[in-house]
Amino acid sequence: MPVRPSAARTSKQKTSPTPDAAARAARSAAPVYKRIVLKISGEGFCKPGGFGIEGETIGRIAEEVADVARLGIQVAVVVGGGNFLRGSTLAEKSRIHPASAHYMGMLATVINALALQEELETHKLITRVQSAINISAVCEPFIRRRCISHLEKGRVVILGAGTGRPFVTTDSAAALAAVELGADVLLKATKVDGVYSADPMKDKNAKRYTGLTYNQVINDRLKVMDVSAIDMCQQNGVPIIVFSLMKPGNMRRVVLGEHVGTTIDE
Ligand code: UDP
């Protein structure tokens, strides 16, 4: 089970380990998870406010993922596509049918997946890209059993094209993947360092939560992930950790059980 410290949590602590356990794990560099699904949004592919893929940013993120994979954890990465486009925004600003705009968003995630694959391979990792939309010239289709087999062989699997269906986001795809692949945790790497009571950019009194229950997130309409993604994790007992991509070393800290960002569970 994951090791998470409990100080200052606002939620019940049924699955929380002791701070001592977290500190011990961090010292011995022993990961507390066997298999993780890591959601990296499009923000992980370019500078803040930028567009497309920017080498330095993706290089740094890949280094962090490689660092985690080298600890012996099985890593499946779900990539977003917001650095290129989000279907709902494009549909609002154009005459493109929303469904087509969403498919375009899914294709954008495949571009990111291929970029991340190349970067990870510079770290001598063996990787596979699997796509929920068949694009056989560039990657494998998503096949659950094959994906698990890759993970068991120590390959990092990058999942592109979200769920393969329009009108949802890659957060839902990540929740689905975490459940399908039997991951111990869903790690959501984003530009903010956790879940806040309000937008910290707009409200200086916004408070960061260290721990929340699924119900708190849903009932208080906290902007973390799609409600369906939270619900999926709740129904299947997959904890979620939201943390900042921007701080180097964070990913490693999370998998070693240090308390980083916000943990969401029962
Ligand atoms: N998308 C979709 N179905 C999915 C996943 C993604 O239609 O299962 C589309 C949707 O338009 C979304 C876009 O792909 O806005 C890019 O994904 P997302 O917004 O999740 O990227 P992120 O915000 O994580 O960068």
Image (cartoon, grey):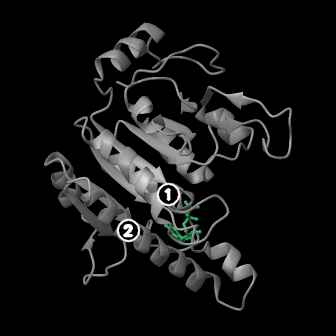
- The answer to whether the beta carbon of the residue marked 2 is less than 8 Å from any atom of ligand 1 is no
Picture layout, residue 34 above or below residue 211: below
Residue at the (54%, 72%) spot, across then down: 52
Residue located at (50% from left, 66% from top) = 54
Quarter of the image where ligand 1 sits: bottom right
User: Considering the numbered disc 1 on the image, is that residue within a helix, a strand or a loop?
Assistant: helix
Disc 2 element = helix
Q: Relative to residue 13, is residue 204 depicted above or below?
A: below
Q: Quickly name the residue at label 2.
A: 115
- Mark 1, ligand 1, within 8 Å: the answer is no
Q: CA distance from mark 2 to mark 1?
A: 11 Å
Q: Spot the residue most to the front.
A: 56
> Which of the 4 image quarters holds residue 64?
top left
Quarter holding the N terminus is: top left
Where residue 82 appears, x then y in whole percent?
58, 67
Disc with the residue nearer the chain's start (2 vs 1): 1
| Residue shown at the point (69%, 82%) measured from the top left | 91
Label of residue 57 in the image: 1
Residue 193 falls in which quadrant of the image?
top right
Mark 1, other Cα within 10 Å: few <14 / some 14–19 / many ≥20: some
> Looking at the picture, which amino acid does disc 2 mark?
Ala
